[in-house]
C-alpha cells in the first residue's frame, strides 16, 4: 500500500503527466455528459421499455459499447462505432487493394495522413447510413413524439447524430495527442465501465438477499482468475531472436549501431486481438435479428426450433458454434495481419537474420510456421473467453454482470488498461522514478522496438 501511495505521488509530481491525465479525464467527462443529452423529439422511457436493455442481441452489444447512450437516444447514440467500422474497412482494404497497401507500407507519415483523412470521410458516410437506421429503429419502437413533424425529426437528428460521432472522434484524437493512451479505445472502455457498477451492485444485492454470500465470494474469485488469465494471454509473446550482422566500411571494420547485438521479434500469441469475437458475435446476432423481425411483424408467430436456439447467445448450441467461429476467424485475421514475407524483407534490409535460419524464403517460412503454432492456443483461449458469459449465466449470475466474465467487454478492458498503464510507466521511468511494478515491464504498444514489424509496415 505504501508503494502504491508513493507511485501516485510520483505521478502527480510530473507536471506533463499530471496535465495529460487531467486533460484525458476532462474529455472523458464531456463524452459521458453527452451520453445523457437526448435527441429532440425522442421519448427515452419508451425506447428503454421497448429494448429492456438486454445485452443478448446486437442492440444490447452496441448499447454496452456506447455506455448506455444508444438506449438513451442521446447525441452520442452511435458513439465512436462508425469510426471503428471505417478503420476496420480501411485496414481490410490495406490487405487487398494495392493503393492502400502502398499508403500503409511505403509512404510513411504522408501515407498515414492520407489514410486518416480517408477514414474520417468514410466515418461520415457510415454515420449517415447508421444514423438513418438508428432513427428508423427508434420510430419502430414507438419512441418518437407525435408533436414533431417527421421531416424535421429525420433531418435534424441525422445531422445531430453525425455531429456527435464526429465530435466523439475528435475527442479521441485529442486524447491520443495530448492525453494518456489511445483515445478511441478509452472512449469505448469508459462506455463499457459505465455499466459495470450497476451490474455489480445488482449481483451483490441479489446474492446477499438470497443468502448466497459464499457464492458471491466464489464469483469474485472466479472473475479475478479470468482477468489474470486474460492479462497473461494479451501480453504473451513468442520471442524470435534476431542477430544484427557487422558491416565493413572503408578500411576498418565498423558496425551498425545495433551490430552484434541480439534483439527479438515479438510474435503475439493473440495477434488478432478482439476482432475474431466481434466478427463471430456479429454473425451469431443474425438469428436474433430474424427472430425480432418475425415477432415484430406477427406477434403470434413465435419462431421455434434451431432459429430459436441460435437466437439465445447463452444456449449450448449457440456457444459451441460461437467457439468454432472465433477459432476460425482468429486464424483468418492473423493470416491477414501477420505477413511473414514482410518480416523477412525487413530483416534483410536491416542486415539482420534469425540464427540458424537462412535469409529470404526460409526466414518467411520459419516465421509462418511459428505463427501457426502459437495461433492455435491463442485461438482456443479466445474461443473459451467468448463463451464464458454463457457459463456464468448457467451458474446463476445475472446477464448484466455475466458479460464481463468474457467476450469483447473483458478483452477491451484488459487491453486498454494495460496500454494506459504502460504509457504512465514510460513517463515514470523516463524521469528516473520507479515503475508501476517491482519487476518486469508492462507490455503495451510501445514496449518493444520491433513490435510493429510486419503489421505496421
Image: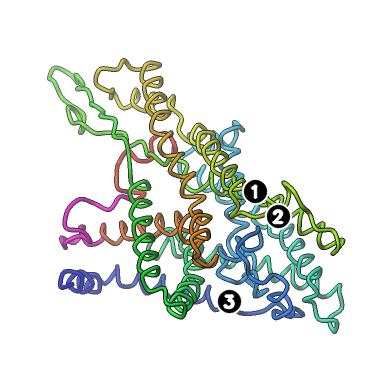
Please say if 93 is above or below 181: above
Element marked by disc 1: helix
Q: Is residue 303 part of the magenta span, yes or no?
A: no
Relative image position of residue 281 (x, y in whole percent): 60, 50
Q: For the stretch drawn in magenta, what is the main secondary structure?
A: loop
Q: Mark 2 points at which residue?
A: 288
The foreground one among 100 and 34 is 34
Mark 1, Cα crowd under 10 Å, few <14 / some 14-19 / many 20+, is many
Q: Quadrant of the C terminus?
A: top left
The N terminus: image quadrant: bottom left
Residue depicted at x 86% and y 62%: 300
Q: Residue 353: x, y in percent?
A: 28, 22
Residue occupied by mark 3: 34
Q: In this view, does 201 lie above or below 287?
A: below
Of circles 3 and 1, which is in front?
Answer: 1
For the residues bearing labels 2 and 1, Cβ distance under 8 angstroms: yes
Q: Which mark is residue 284?
A: 1
Relative height, residue 360 to residue 76 (above, below): above
Of marks 3 and 2, which one's residue comes earlier in the chain? 3
The span picked out in magenta is 426-443
Is residue 441 covered in magenta? yes
SS assignment at label 3: helix
Do the numbered discs 3 and 1 sit on residues whose CB atoms are within 8 Å?
A: no
Q: Distance between the residues labelled 3 and 2?
A: 30 Å
Q: Which colour scheme is used?
A: rainbow
Tell me residue 363's x, y (percent): 36, 20
Crowding near the residue tagged with mark 2, few <14, some 14–19, many ≥20 C-alpha atoms within 10 Å = many
**Residue at far left of view:** 252
Q: Which residue is drawn at 23% across and 72% down?
A: 8
Amino acid at each position: 500500500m505504501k508503494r502504491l501511495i508513493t507511485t501516485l505521488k510520483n505521478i502527480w509530481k510530473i507536471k506533463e503527466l499530471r496535465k495529460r491525465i487531467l486533460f484525458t479525464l476532462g474529455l472523458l467527462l464531456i463524452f459521458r455528459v453527452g451520453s445523457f443529452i437526448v435527441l429532440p423529439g425522442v421519448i427515452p422511457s419508451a425506447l428503454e421499455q421497448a429494448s429492456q436493455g438486454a445485452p443478448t442481441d446486437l442492440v444490447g452489444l452496441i448499447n454496452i459499447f456506447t455506455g448506455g447512450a444508444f438506449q438513451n437516444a442521446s447525441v452520442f447514440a452511435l458513439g465512436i462505432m462508425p469510426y471503428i467500422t471505417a478503420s476496420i474497412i480501411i485496414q481490410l482494404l490495406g490487405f487487398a487493394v494495392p493503393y492502400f497497401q502502398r499508403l500503409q507500407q511505403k509512404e510513411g507519415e504522408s501515407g498515414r495522413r492520407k489514410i486518416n483523412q480517408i477514414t474520417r470521410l468514410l466515418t461520415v458516410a457510415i454515420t449517415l447510413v447508421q444514423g438513418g437506421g438508428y432513427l428508423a429503429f427508434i420510430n419502430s419502437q414507438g419512441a418518437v413524439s407525435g408533436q414533431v413533424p417527421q421531416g424535421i425529426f429525420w433531418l435534424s437528428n441525422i445531422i445531430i447524430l453525425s455531429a456527435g460521432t464526429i465530435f466523439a472522434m475528435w475527442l479521441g484524437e485529442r486524447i491520443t495527442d495530448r492525453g494518456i493512451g489511445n483515445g478511441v479505445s478509452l472512449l469505448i472502455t469508459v462506455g463499457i465501465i459505465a455499466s459495470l457498477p450497476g451490474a455489480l451492485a445488482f449481483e451483490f444485492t441479489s446474492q446477499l438477499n438470497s443468502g448466497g454470500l459464499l457464492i458471491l465470494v466464489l464469483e469474485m474469485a472466479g472473475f479475478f482468475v479470468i482477468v489474470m488469465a486474460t492479462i497473461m494471454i494479451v501480453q504473451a509473446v513468442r520471442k524470435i531472436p534476431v542477430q544484427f550482422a557487422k558491416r565493413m566500411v572503408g578500411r576498418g571494420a565498423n558496425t551498425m549501431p545495433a551490430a552484434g547485438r541480439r534483439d527479438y521479434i515479438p510474435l503475439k500469441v493473440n495477434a488478432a486481438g478482439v476482432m475474431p469475437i466481434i466478427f463471430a458475435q456479429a454473425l451469431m446476432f443474425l438469428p436474433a435479428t430474424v427472430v425480432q423481425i418475425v415477432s415484430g411483424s406477427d406477434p403470434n408467430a413465435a419462431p421455434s426450433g434451431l432459429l430459436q436456439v441460435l437466437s439465445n447467445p447463452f444456449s449450448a448450441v449457440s456457444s459451441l458454434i460461437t467457439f468454432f467461429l472465433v477459432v476460425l476467424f482468429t486464424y483468418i485475421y492473423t493470416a491477414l495481419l501477420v505477413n511473414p514475407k514482410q518480416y523477412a524483407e525487413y530483416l534483410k534490409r536491416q542486415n539482420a537474420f534469425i540464427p540458424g535460419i537462412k535469409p529470404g524464403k526460409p526466414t518467411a517460412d520459419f516465421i509462418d510456421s511459428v505463427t501457426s503454432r502459437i495461433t492455435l492456443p491463442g485461438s482456443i483461449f479466445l474461443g473459451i473467453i467468448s463463451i464464458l458469459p454463457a457459463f456464468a449465466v448457467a451458474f446463476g449470475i445475472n446477464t448484466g454482470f455475466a458479460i464481463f466474465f468474457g467476450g469483447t467487454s473483458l478483452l477491451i478492458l484488459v487491453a486498454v488498461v494495460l496500454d494506459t498503464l504502460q504509457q504512465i510507466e514510460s513517463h515514470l521511468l523516463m524521469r528516473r522514478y520507479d515503475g508501476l511494478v517491482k519487476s518486469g515491464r508492462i507490455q503495451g504498444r510501445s514496449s518493444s522496438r520491433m513490435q510493429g514489424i510486419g503489421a505496421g509496415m
